[in-house]
Structures are given as C-alpha cells and as structure tokens.
Image: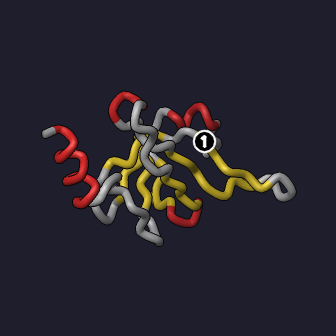
C-alpha cells in the first residue's frame, strides 16, 4: 500500500495499549540519505487557545506502528511518552490560578 503524507494526515492515531486518541499526523521525520521515513509526528495541542503555548509533541517511531487502516493508524508506543499533557500538580496549580 502506497500512501502520501496528505493521506496520512487524514488518519487518526490511536494507542492500542491505552485506547487513547493521540491525534492526527502532522509531520514525518525522514532520513535524507536512505530516503526512509523514521517517525511520524503529532504536534501538541494548544493550551487555552494558544495563549499558554502548546503541549508536548508526540513522536511515533515507525517501529511502533502496528496497523495502518483506511481511517485509523494503530500504534503501540514502546517508550511511554507523557501524554497526559499535564501532571496533577500542574493541574492543581492551574486551578489555584482560577480561584
């Protein structure tokens, strides 16, 4: 199956270990010398309409991709990245700012 980057951008990425929706593909990392795709990238979501910056980007190595379907890409992340987007302490700090 041959797939362009534009086709990949329309597919939702789901982690099969947690069932979490990670987002949609935004970019690809390539090795120019070998012309191989090394990883797919999902940019972090904007926090508070972009005023508080972005969350961490998710980089998915090609070795972690399990299935590329017509609508979905299923991955199993080998190194569990921090996808909770903020820890409980940070969440409590943010809540204290709202009081």
Q: Is residue 98 left or right of residue 69?
A: left
Determine whether the residue tagged by mark 1 lies in a helix, strand or loop. strand
Position of the C terminus by quadrant: top left
Residue extending farthest bottom: 78
Q: Is residue 19 left or right of residue 8?
A: left
Residue name at image x 48 percent, y 33 percent: 10
Residue name at image x 50 percent, y 43 percent: 43
Counting the numbered discs, the total is 1
Locate residue 61, reporting x and y percent: 57, 61
Within the image, what quadrant is residue 26 found in? Answer: top right
Q: Nearer the viewer, residue 72 or 48?
A: 48
Residue extending farthest right: 33
Locate residue 30, reporting x and y percent: 73, 51
Q: Is residue 19 visible?
A: no
Q: Is residue 21 left or right of residue 36?
A: left
Locate residue 95, reporting x and y percent: 18, 45
Residue extending farthest left: 99
Q: Is residue 27 visible?
A: yes
Say above or below: 60 vs 25. Answer: below
Way the structure is coloured: secondary structure
Residue name at image x 50 percent, y 49 percent: 57
Q: Nearer the viewer, residue 66 or 58?
A: 58
Q: Which residue is mark 1?
A: 27
Say above or below: 59 vs 50. Answer: below
């Amino acid at each position: 199956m041959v797939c362009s980057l534009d086709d990949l951008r329309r597919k939702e990425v789901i982690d099969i270990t947690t069932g979490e929706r990670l987002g949609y593909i935004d970019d690809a990392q390539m090795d120019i010398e070998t012309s191989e795709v090394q990883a797919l990238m999902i940019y972090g979501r904007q926090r508070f309409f972009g005023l508080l910056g972005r969350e961490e980007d998710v980089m998915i190595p090609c070795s972690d991709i399990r299935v590329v379907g017509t609508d979905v890409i299923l991955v199993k992340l080998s190194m569990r990245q921090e996808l909770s987007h903020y820890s409980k302490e940070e969440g409590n700090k943010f809540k204290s700012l709202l009081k």
